[in-house]
């Protein structure tokens, strides 16, 4: 399984970015696809997740009301649309995939991780 994250960059506060995660290597039916973020010295933080089969989303506190997760089965890609970005959203964002369980907010659920894409939000 390979996950290739892209779309990060430098943006001003209140701006938007769309992250993409291109997935390959298996049939992702029954998987949950997630986005986490991490800053130096801190643990990975859950941002959002989506059921590949049922298209059901979950959002962590940082994402609620500002971010939207979506998946395109035809392209095997998961997206994270991030709006109204804040400087505290600055982090490396990782996409991840794991067999769907009831718990999607913990990193232990995910077996596969992408390389991360860096997001910097300037004030």
Image: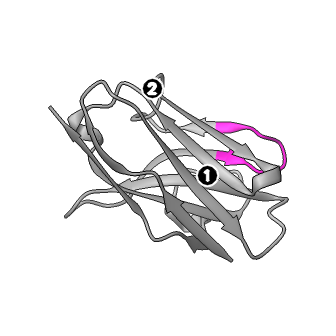
Kindly identify the residue that appears in the image at 64 percent across and 50 percent down: 78
Q: How is the image coloured?
A: one colour
Which label belongs to residue 90?
Answer: none
Question: Residue at position x 84%, y 49% from top?
Answer: 53
Q: Which residue is at the front of the view, 55 or 43?
A: 55
For mark 2, give the secondary structure.
Answer: loop
Residue, far left: 123
Mark 2 crowd level (few <14, some 14–19, many ≥20, 10 Å Cα): some
Q: Quadrant of residue 54?
A: top right
Q: 10 Å neighbourhood of mark 1: few (<14), some, or many (≥20)?
A: many
Q: Main secondary structure of the magenta part?
A: loop
* Apparent side of residue 68 relative to residue 13 in the rendered image (left or right): right
Q: Which mark is residue 66?
A: 2
Question: Any magenta on residue 97?
Answer: no
User: Residue 71 placed where, x, y %?
Assistant: 71, 45
Q: Quadrant of the C terminus?
A: top left
Residue at x-position 38% and y-position 54% = 37
Instruction: Report whether 31 appears left or right of 105.
Output: right
Q: Count the numbered circles shown.
A: 2
Question: In the structure shown, which secondary structural element does the residue marked by tag 1 occupy?
Answer: loop
Q: Earlier in the sequence, mark 1 or mark 2?
A: 2
Residue stretch rendered in magenta on the structure: 50-57
Q: Which mark is residue 104?
A: 1
Cβ–Cβ below 8 Å for labels 1 and 2?
no
Quadrant the N terminus occupies:
bottom right
| Residue 86 to residue 78: above or below | above
Q: Which of the pair 21/96 is nearer the observer?
A: 21
Q: Of the residues tagged 1 and 2, which is closer to the observer?
A: 2
Q: Position of residue 55 (x, y in %)?
A: 77, 40
What is the distance, in whole Å, between disc 1 and disc 2 at their CAs? 19 Å
Which of 24/106 is in front?
A: 24
């Amino acid at each position: 399984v390979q996950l290739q994250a892209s779309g990060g960059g430098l943006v001003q506060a209140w701006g938007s970015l769309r992250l993409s995660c291109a997935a390959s290597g298996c049939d992702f039916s029954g998987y949950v696809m997630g986005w986490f973020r991490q800053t130096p010295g801190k643990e990975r933080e859950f941002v959002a997740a989506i059921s590949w089969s049922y298209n059901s989303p979950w959002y962590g506190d940082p994402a609620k009301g500002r971010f939207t997760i979506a998946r395109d089965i035809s392209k095997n890609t998961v997206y994270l649309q991030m709006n109204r970005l804040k400087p505290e959203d600055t982090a490396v964002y990782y996409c991840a995939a794991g067999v769907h369980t009831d718990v999607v907010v913990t990193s232990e659920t995910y077996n596969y991780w992408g390389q991360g894409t860096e997001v910097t939000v300037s004030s």
